Amino acid sequence: MKFRRYIGRRAAAIVLALCLAAPLSGCQAQRLVMTRGFESDELFRIDSQHCSAGEYRVLLLDLQKQCERLFGHEIWDTANGGLLKEAVEQKALSQVSRLKVMRLIAIRDNIMLTDAEESKAEEAARAFCEALTKEEKDYLDVSEKEVSGLYADYLLAQKVYSSIGTSFEERYNSFCDTLDYDINESVWDAVDLAGVENLTETPGFSEIYREYLENSPSS
């Protein structure tokens, strides 16, 4: 009982931290528009950028692994498990939407990755996919190309951030105000956490990023 109460207090702290951090890392678009006409696995669109449910699940799984490394797989069954799950889902959506906005800014500012940076993103994606268990691959249902695109988006986002400097948040928020954000509600409702107990045995998306890309020239 003491252990479960300890887990509950720690989980509540993590929930608070995630909830406070999420708005700072997402797209504060002026309009949230629910539309039809999406592809079957398409989660949302921001202007010309599309996001698949698989891309979202990659970041969702990464956050789930981080939580389970702290508290264990049983955390989701505790009193605070539901709140933590919701915070993790919102944080993952916030992260991936920010990446898509950063790509739009990169297109506007003519910022691109070099061939070497693209190759590093591909190498990181290959390492990530090869480390996954069969259960994780089945859950993610994502191609190596999509994972490579996510790593490339992270590198590109860092280049955008570096190019803008101290006025970044002002420029970012102003840019978001011009965008339409359309989410596929049926896909959003269908995505859940991975029901895999041994997630901590394989590296997460962010761990692979730190190993392969964090020391690249654009990071």
Image (cartoon, helix red, strand yellow):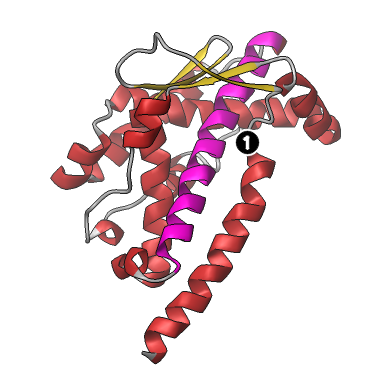
Secondary structure predominantly adopted by residues drawn in magenta:
helix
130 versus 186 height, above or below: below
Q: Of helix, strand and loop, which one carries label 1?
A: loop
Kindly identify the residue that appears in the image at 49 percent across and 69 percent down.
11
Residue 108 percent across, percent down from the top left: 69, 9
Kindly identify the residue that appears in the image at 52 percent across and 77 percent down.
9
Q: Which residues are magenta?
A: 80-108
Q: Residue 62 vs residue 182: left or right?
A: left
Q: Which residue is mark 1?
A: 26
Quarter of the picture holding the C terminus: top right
43 versus 10 height, above or below: above
Q: Name the residue type under label 1.
A: Gly
Residue 142 percent across, percent down from the top left: 28, 29
Kindly identify the residue that appears in the image at 22 percent across and 54 percent down.
196
Residue 96 magenta = yes
Kindly identify the residue that appears in the image at 32 percent across and 67 percent down.
77
